[in-house]
Amino acid sequence: MKKWLIVFFLVLLVVGAVSAQTTTSTTLRFAWESNTETDLDGYGLYSGSVEGTYDVHIDLDIPVSPTAEVNYEASNILVNVNEPTYFVVDAFDTAGNRSGFSNVVSYIHCVPEPEQTQSIACGTGYTGTKIQKRVSSCSFNSMPVWGNWIDVSNTCVAQTICKTSTETRDAGACGTGYTGNVVERRTSTCASTYATPVWGAWIADRSACVALTACKPLADRVETASCGEGYSGSIITTTKSTCPDPYGQPVWGNPTTVNTCTALTLCVAPAPESRTLSCPSGQTGSIIETRSSSCPDKYGTPVIGSWIQTSNTCKVVSTCVPVTTTKTTRCLKWYEKGSITQQSTSICQEDGTSIPGPWTVISSTCRPWWKR
């Protein structure tokens, strides 16, 4: 038996379910193209919650007919509520052989969801709540669809808009050195559009106060002079003013001088230096380096230069001795039994180390099978 089944429609006959259930039983009608093999013995119906995984299987008790189409009405089929259930069929012969699965059909047993109710705020500028409800509806072989929310009660009431204001009061004379009076003000604020106004603290307003020719010290007079050639620092002369009378003219005091001049030291560069260094381990000879100093500025600390190599007589003392190694390997698989002998001699490098040399064939007893 080689023929594959082809399911081409699914018809719902009976629906019975409760919305709280996750599964229910119903009656479905299936139809598919008949198999024409003479040894056909029947058909199997499979179902599952996951496409490709079928955990329910029954062999159908229906007569085998050579007609072009098979119609089968299945009673008490267990299906998912509001989730797909997948179905396939196969055929089997009198020897127990089974065909592959047909194409997959799915069925959603739709049951309306329980009515939903929600409470929502009335929105900006209102107090109270709205109570709304909605219901779901079903159509064949589909998920439940929710309708629109509908008001069932409304207690919304418009709120009063919060308004701010300002108050003033006389707080007395401006004080010594001024004419006029101080005025205090306070302003109410709104925490939100519909809140109760809240008064802030009293704040003094002295804009009406006029000063009586108050004396203010003038900015300090500062004169700076350099110390001259060969010195660092400066000579600073400062003169300050004071107000003997709070409402009079400022008076200049006596100048004060601060002298921070310090003699500079002439820069003298040391004579050039040289040093002799030992060669690295395993080498003979020596390394000679020199460095010199300079004065970038007439008065300052000399700058010592870097050590510069002027002589290098170092040579590697090599202790490397070439070593010869011999190995024997098997012949390739398309050769008869035998062996190959190879030899390698290490190579000494300039730094005294050695590296392996190339392998060279020195003898071979291998012979191709076609030259027996």
Image: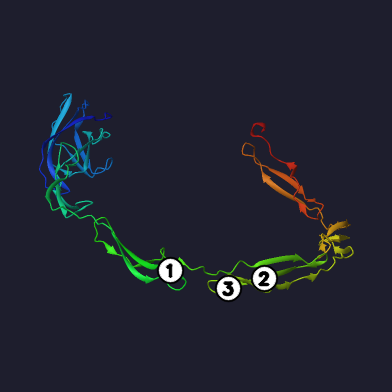
Q: Which label lies toward us, 2 or 3?
A: 3
Gap in angstroms between the C-alphas marked 2 and 3: 14 Å
Of callouts 2 and 1, which one flags the residue occurring earlier in the amino acid sequence?
A: 1
Decide: few, some or many residues near mark 3? Use Cα within 10 Å; few <14, some 14-19, many ≥20: some
The quadrant of the picture occupied by the N terminus is top left
Tell me, for residue 179, which label it has, or none.
1
Q: Which residue is mark 2?
A: 239
What is the x, y in percent for residue 282?
Answer: 82, 61
Q: Is 174 drawn above or below residue 48 in the view shown? A: below
Q: Within the image, what quadrant is residue 227 found in? A: bottom right
Residue 262 location, x and y as percent? Answer: 79, 71
Given residues 240 and 277, the one toward you in this image is 240
Q: Nearer the viewer, residue 118 or 157?
A: 157
Question: Residue sitting at 15 percent across and 51 percent down?
Answer: 130
Q: Secondary structure at mark 1?
A: strand
Locate the C terminus by quadrant.
Answer: top right
Q: Of discs 3 and 1, which sits in the foreground?
A: 1
Label 3 sits on residue: 243
